[in-house]
């Protein structure tokens, strides 16, 4: 019998992944890890074992990973409590000490060669997993369509759709599709060491044109984009982050041409217009 574990099961990605995994293997073979175990117990399928999984608590992680064979390691959100690379190192150390034989880690597109700041923590984590000598699959997730929810809502409301990514493309897909694929990699008999997961590469104009209704679509400079976000009430720091994401897309960092995601899912990805409607209904 193989025992599977998933971290961060109270997050959106983890919730979907554990439910998908329970469709693929018996729920009694699954361990769900979370900081808030009470919340996790209310979310996971019946039969799944819930254990503590705080990335800042090394000893707790070692205990919680006892008996686990394969681990889906969902990357953490950057925190002021502990740097993300240290959090991730704690998980890796605990997995090795507990005897975990395989880790599937949610990473960043082309993390081994990417130079943008968002890639750095993932690059360090991939290196740490390799240095630990653990069999692995790096799930290099491209861009969640949900990341653009605010812009999709703007267009759906008939308001101007403003962006600065120009003709840059990103491999948009639904977060649940990435999560479902992660669960499938975890149970695969012979997983690849690296998956570049992405949807078809699309521009911001492609997104806008897939939203029903009529509204202005305008490409602007990064400076004008930041001013627009702040004028709409965005916190200046968030506006700067969103502008940096636009620049990253414009520079081609997220442009991708791969079928890894639909191949693992065994089905086509949700058509863009349908995916946008799904996001808007959340």
Image (cartoon, helix red, strand yellow):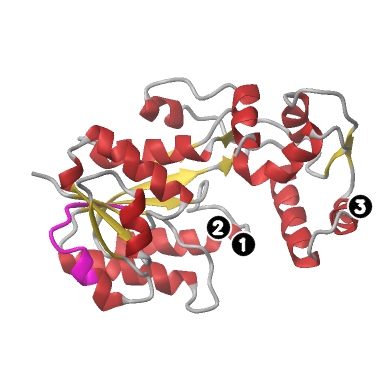
Q: Whole-Å distance between the Cαs marked 2 and 3?
A: 26 Å
- Tell me if residue 160 comes above or below residue 96 in the rendering: above
Question: Which residue has dot 3 on it?
Answer: 224
Q: For the residues carrying marks 2 and 3, which lies nearer the camera in this image?
A: 3
| Residue lying at 89% horizontally and 56% vertically, measured from the top left | 223
Q: Which mark is drawn over residue 117? A: 1
Q: Which residue is labeled 2 in the image?
A: 119
Q: Looking at the picture, how far across and down is residue 142, in whole percent? A: 54, 42
Pick the front one: 49 or 124:
49
Q: Nearer the viewer, residue 29 or 58?
A: 29
The residue drawn where x is 85% and y is 32% is 158
Q: Is mark 3 on a helix, strand or loop?
A: helix
Q: Which callout, 2 or 3, points at the residue further toward the start of the chain?
A: 2
Query: Could one spot residue 166 in this view of the protein?
Result: yes
State if disc 3 and disc 2 touch (CB < 8 Å). Answer: no
Picture disc at residue 62:
none
Q: Which of 78 and 19 is in front in this view?
A: 19
In the rendered image, residue 224, in percent from the top left (x then y), is placed at 91, 52
- Quarter the N terminus occupies: top left
Determine crowd level at label 2: few under 14, some 14-19, many 20+ residues with C-alpha closer than 10 A: some
Q: Residue at x 80, y 59 (%)?
A: 234
Q: Which stretch appears magenta?
A: 62-72
Residue 202 on the magenta segment:
no
**Eyeballing the image, is 175 above or below 117?**
above
- Please tell me whether mark 2 sits on a helix, a strand or a loop: helix
Q: Which of marks 3 and 1 is nearer the N terminus?
A: 1
């Amino acid at each position: 019998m193989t025992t599977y574990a998933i971290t961060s099961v109270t997050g959106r990605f983890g919730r979907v992944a554990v439910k998908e995994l329970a469709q693929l293997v018996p729920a009694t073979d699954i361990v769900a890890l979370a900081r808030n175990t009470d919340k996790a117990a209310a979310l996971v399928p019946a039969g799944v074992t819930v254990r503590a999984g705080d990335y800042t608590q090394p000893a707790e992680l070692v205990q919680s990973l006892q008996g686990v064979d394969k681990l889906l390691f969902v990357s953490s959100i950057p925190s002021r409590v502990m740097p993300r690379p240290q959090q991730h190192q704690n998980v890796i150390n605990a997995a090795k000490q507990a005897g975990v034989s395989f880790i599937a880690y949610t990473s960043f597109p082309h993390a081994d060669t990417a130079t943008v700041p968002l890639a750095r923590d993932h690059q360090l984590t991939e290196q740490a997993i390799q240095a630990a000598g653990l069999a692995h699959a790096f799930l290099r997730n491209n861009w969640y369509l949900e990341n653009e929810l605010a812009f999709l809502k703007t267009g759906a409301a008939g308001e101007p759709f403003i962006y600065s990514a120009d003709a840059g493309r990103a491999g948009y897909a639904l977060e649940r599709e990435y999560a479902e694929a992660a669960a499938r990699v975890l149970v695969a008999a012979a997983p690849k060491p690296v998956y570049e997961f992405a949807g078809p590469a699309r521009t911001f104009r492609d997104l806008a044109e897939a939203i029903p209704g009529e509204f202005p679509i305008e490409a602007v400079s990064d400076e004008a984009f930041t001013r627009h976000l702040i004028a709409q009430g965005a916190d200046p720091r968030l506006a700067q982050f969103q502008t940096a994401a636009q620049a990253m897309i414009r520079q081609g960092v997220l442009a991708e041409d791969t079928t890894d995601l639909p191949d693992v899912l065994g089905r086509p990805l949700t058509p863009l217009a349908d995916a946008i409607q799904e996001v808007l209904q959340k």
